[in-house]
Image (cartoon, helix red, strand yellow):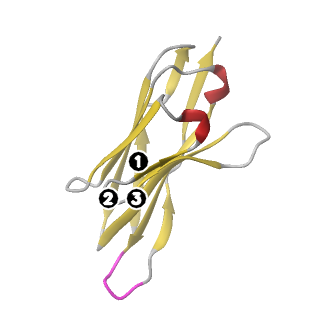
């Protein structure tokens, strides 16, 4: 069983910053790529940023230069530093990990419950 707990969301003014955290716990054999997705009202969930176990990152064009994803492999933590926030960043942000529970089981996706980020103009 894998449990993801997100924190750090909230209300911030345009131009402000927030740092999201995601902690993975449970009986996990290995965590591979981790990422943050977001879903705005009336829109589909979309990738914001992801990072491989080796530290290779990938960002949506809309957040490049403003958001930074990082992870602590030893502690099963993943972060999203969000700077220069705009009202267009308002959404529920979800943590995603690709993990194996055992060495013999396939890799699969796990999702957090989501954390609301609201940016006021």
Residue 69 place in picture, x, y as percent: 40, 42
Viewer-side residue, 65 vs 77 = 65
Q: Say few, some or many: other residues with alpha carbon within 10 Å of mark 3 (under 14 / 14 to 19 / 20 or more).
A: some
Whichever of labels 1 and 2 marks the residue nearer the N terminus, that label is 1
Q: Is residue 46 left or right of residue 1?
A: right
Q: Mark 1 points at which residue?
A: 5
Decide: marks 1, 3 in contact (CB < 8 A)? yes
Q: Mark 2 points at which residue?
A: 25
* Distance from the alpha carbon under mark 2 to that under mark 3: 5 Å
Q: Is residue 28 visible?
A: no
Most common secondary structure along the magenta stretch: loop
- Tell me if residue 27 comes above or below residue 74 in the rendering: below
Label 3: which residue? 3
Identity of the residue furthest to the right in this view: 42
The disc placed on residue 120 is: none
Q: Earlier in the sequence, mark 2 or mark 3?
A: 3
Q: Position of residue 77 (x, y in %)?
A: 31, 49
How packed mark 2 is, by other alpha carbons closer than 10 Å (few <14, some 14-19, many 20 or more), is: some
x, y percentage for residue 50? 46, 51
Decide: few, some or many residues near mark 1? Use Cα within 10 Å; few <14, some 14-19, many ≥20: some
Whether tag 1 and tag 2 are in contact, CB under 8 A, the answer is: yes
> How far separated are the C-alphas under marks 1 and 3?
7 Å
The residue lying toward the viewer, choosing from 101 and 67, is: 67
Q: What element carries label 2?
A: strand
The residue at the point 59 percent across, 39 percent down is: 61
Query: Is any part of residue 34 visible from this angle?
Result: yes
The residue depicted at 41 percent of the width and 61 percent of the height is 33
Give the magenta part as a residue range: 101-105
């Amino acid at each position: 069983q894998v449990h993801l707990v997100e924190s750090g969301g909230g209300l911030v003014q345009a131009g402000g910053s927030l740092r999201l955290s995601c902690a993975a716990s449970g009986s996990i054999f290995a965590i591979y790529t981790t990422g943050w997705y977001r879903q705005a009202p009336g829109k589909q969930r979309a990738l914001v940023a992801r990072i491989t176990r080796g530290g290779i990152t990938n960002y949506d064009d809309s957040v490049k230069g403003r958001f930074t994803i990082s992870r602590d492999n030893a502690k099963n933590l993943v972060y999203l530093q969000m700077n220069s926030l705009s009202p267009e960043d308002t959404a529920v942000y979800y943590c995603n990990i690709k993990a194996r529970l055992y060495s013999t089981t396939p890799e699969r996706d796990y999702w957090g419950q989501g954390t609301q980020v609201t940016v006021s103009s």
